[in-house]
Image (spheres, rainbow, N blue to C red):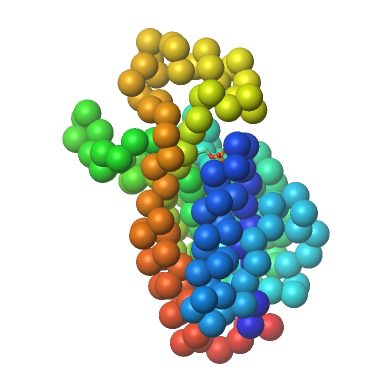
Amino acid sequence: MKVLVAYATRHGSTAGIAERIAGRLVNDGVPAEALPVEKVRDVSPYDAVVLGSAAYMGRWLRDAGAFAKRQREALQSRQIWLFSSGPLGRDLVDKDGKNVLVNSRPKEFGELQSQLKPKDTRVFFGAWDPSSPAVGIGERLMRLAPVSTGALPSGDFRDWDAIDAWADDIAATLKGSPRTT
Ligand SMILES: Cc1cc2nc3c(=O)[nH]c(=O)nc-3n(C[C@H](O)[C@H](O)[C@H](O)COP(=O)(O)O)c2cc1C
């Protein structure tokens, strides 16, 4: 049994979530490794896949969608979980009274849910540091736009307890199910 935690990231915080999930799975007795999607050529060595991406403007990063498309058949024959790293801040309810984690589900989840039949999908709070040299002018300007003001707080809002608990659920499911390959 080996699990691949494949991820797409722009600024690294989703990589941190993926590595945390892989580390937690290993602690739970399930061999796992985290790799960026662009480094994964073949998923055949893995029995299960956790696929995650950062969300920007309501969508996953292109590399994550491309990976899901490229590996569709292999993913369909494996147990798969999807996560998105997204909203910034700690409020669970937005100004319109909507659940932030539900409202931040990326567009790709709908299609991938019907294609890949994931065991579970999850949105985690993300992180953003606008002072990082890696943040380009486009993102800086977007933050200043009236529509985004107040909507893009900077900071690290990743909820490690929620991430660990999700990894524990995955480990429990995998330990209770027969090998798929
Ligand atoms: C310009 C910009 C747009 C964003 N758009 C969204 C979005 O539509 N939905 C969302 O949940 N998070 C959004 N975020 C938050 C990012 O998803 C969050 O910062 C994430 O943790 C980044 O992951 P990364 O460091 O792996 O790139 C946005 C952030 C920025 C800077």
**Image quadrant of residue 98?**
top left
Residue at (58%, 59%) from the top-left corner? 19
Answer left or right for 139 relative to 89.
Answer: right
Say which quadrant the C terminus sits in: bottom right
User: Where is 171 relative to 61, above or below?
Assistant: below
Say which quadrant the N terminus sits in: bottom right
Answer left or right for 119 relative to 72.
Answer: left
In the image, 90 versus 40, the foreground residue is: 90
**Image quadrant of residue 12?**
top right
Q: Is residue 23 visible?
A: yes
User: Where is 103 relative to 167, above or below?
Assistant: above
Q: Position of residue 44 (x, y in %)?
A: 75, 72
Residue at (58%, 27%) from the top-left corner? 132
Q: Position of residue 154 (x, y in %)?
A: 42, 29
Answer left or right for 158 relative to 49.
Answer: left
Q: Position of residue 11 (x, y in %)?
A: 60, 37
Q: Give the residue furthest to the right.
A: 41
In the image, 27 versus 40, the foreground residue is: 27
Answer left or right for 41 relative to 132.
Answer: right
* Number of residue marks: 0
Residue at (34%, 45%) from the top-left corner? 101
Q: Position of residue 62 (x, y in %)?
A: 65, 39
Residue at (43%, 11%) from the top-left corner? 145
Q: Is residue 174 visible?
A: no
User: Where is 3 relative to 91, above or below?
Assistant: below
